[in-house]
Amino acid sequence: MVQEKQIIECVPNFSEGRNKDVIKQITDEVEQVKGVKLLDIDPGEATNRTVVTFVGEPQVVMEAAFRCVRKAAQLIDMRQHHGAHPRMGATDVCPLIPVSGITLEECAHLARQLAERIANELNIPCYCYEASAFTPERKNLAVCREGEYEGLAKRMSTIGEKPDYGAREWDEQMARAGCTAVGARDFLIATNFNLNTTSTRRANAIAFDVREKGRPKREGGSPVGKPMKNENGEIIMIPGTLKDTKAIGWFIDEYGIAQVSMNITNINTTPLHIAFDEVCRCAQNRGIRVTGTEIVGLIPKRTLTEAGAYFLKKQNRSTGIPEEDIIKIAIKSMGLDDLKPFNPREKVIEYLLEDAEKKQKLIDLTVKEFADETSRESPAPGGGTISAYMGALGAALGTMVANLSSHKAGWDARWEEFSNWANKGQAIQSELMVLVDEDTEAFNRIMSAFGLPKESAEEKTARSMAIQEATLFATEVPLHTMQASYKVFELCRAMAEEGNPNSVSDAGVGVLAARAAVLGAGLNVKINASGLKDKQKAEQLVSEANILINKANEAEKEIMKIVEAKL
């Protein structure tokens, strides 16, 4: 199965919100790192602080973060800084946030690496906070920033208050750049739930019902009763129903409605769709309807795919459908297009990254364009690419039968069984669609290696090594295609035996496509393996290919007997 690309977000806060030239020089550092997408620049004059947001794969984001911290230290003199927001350094905080394919714990490890590098190479002391904290107390940013910039000189020599990296005596350089807090935290979603009321009081009541903090406990249980206090004189709170959420009610002049405005600080604990359903429930208890949802800022793709799958399951519908269809369900279910059109390409971080790095892929071509491109005199795309595509079509046919079976009248009790098969089919199809382009890329690598200079002995050696590496890769890719395509047989066998009998022929065609994919990719393994100097490795790869070919031939015969018997 193709591993999900790792994407993280970085949201550094710089102690400059007024000088546009300084802000631009800092953000230019981010944009100069290839593979990083700068999403937002938010300066504040009163706070004299700018919040910058960028995303990408971990290593390039770490590099961009380091560069902008370095630039900020060069341009911002903390001795001259004044603003309304707490701060202790030119780069005050620098959190890393998991978006996809990576855990919070992994981000915490990366944050510590970044903090250590900043301290060692830039001589800027760093505290680690939230998930990257070394002690429970320092999970709280306020503890790390206690005393702010003005208190740093004393803290540098106080046991228990020194930074985690780069502690030393107060000096001129530290006086200028201050300290930085580097951390890792969960993704925060800012969202507003639209209500069919203009009452801020009613919206606030719903917000208090759901937010984790809840509402004050009042005497007699009356909403107008006096707030009750504990023995320490603190107001007793009745917790709300949603963990890791903060919420208030307000009225929006622009829309002429009240909203429940919510920050979800941990989407693993409280996903957006769970928050939506709970706000709907609490609103209904007060005679109010939620008419839709407004998302402020950007979100990870899984926020929508998880929501779409959640609502499909509630309908007893298959979740093994294309990603864009699942996202449409999420949009309609939560009313994301209630106030204005909702375009996932503009709101989903992964899509923004894809569009920024967009290059023409074979899988983006129309069916006719793909066939035309294959027919041209260039050797790629060739048999390996076509084999991967045939495997993907075989998986798609098996998935289609699963979805038809899930929705078949009278089979309602079996919807989840077929939904699970459809999800397996979608995963196989996705894996093979990646291999469609990867096979052509493998061929291009070989061509690039042959194009390397070969004048000197060193160049000849380097060229030979590059050719062998590229040839090995070009042999392993079609073997991967064979392995992925072989998975189609299990899916199509199950659909031929258990699926909608009216679609058994489709399962049969899926089997034929899978066999062609395995045998076709096998030919590519053999022809590319012949160019390997490591004959032992070549024999191993060809042997694996032959085993898969024999298994595919046997599977095709067995499943086609089942298909023929049902026609």
Image (cartoon, rainbow, N blue to C red):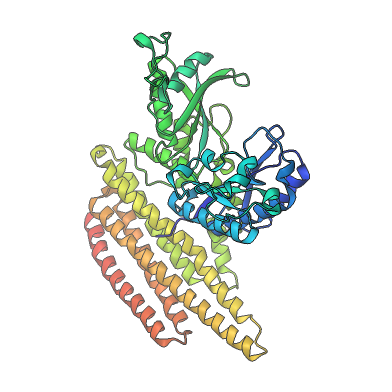
Q: Position of residue 279 (x, y in %)?
A: 42, 25
Q: Nearer the viewer, residue 354 or 48?
A: 48
Q: Is residue 555 left or right of residue 386?
A: left
Rendering coords of residue 252 (x, y %):
59, 20
Q: Quadrant of residue 232?
A: top left
- Farthest bottom residue in view: 457
Placement of 502 over or under 199, stated as above or below: below
Residue 350 visible to the viewer: no
Q: Position of residue 373 (x, y in %)?
A: 58, 65
| 299 or 110: nearer the viewer | 110
Along the viewing direction, whichever of 230 and 484 lies nearer the viewer: 230
Residue beneath the point at 39% across and 17% down: 229
Q: Quadrant of the C terminus?
A: bottom left
- Please tell me whether residue 226 is drawn above or below residue 177 in the rendered image: above
Instruction: From the viewer's perspective, tell me whether residue 10 is left or right of residue 241.
Output: right
Which image quarter is the N terminus in? bottom left
How far from the left and from the top, in percent, is residue 554?
A: 26, 70
**Does residue 352 appear to the left or right of 390 in the view shown?**
right
The residue located at (37%, 84%) in the rendering is: 539
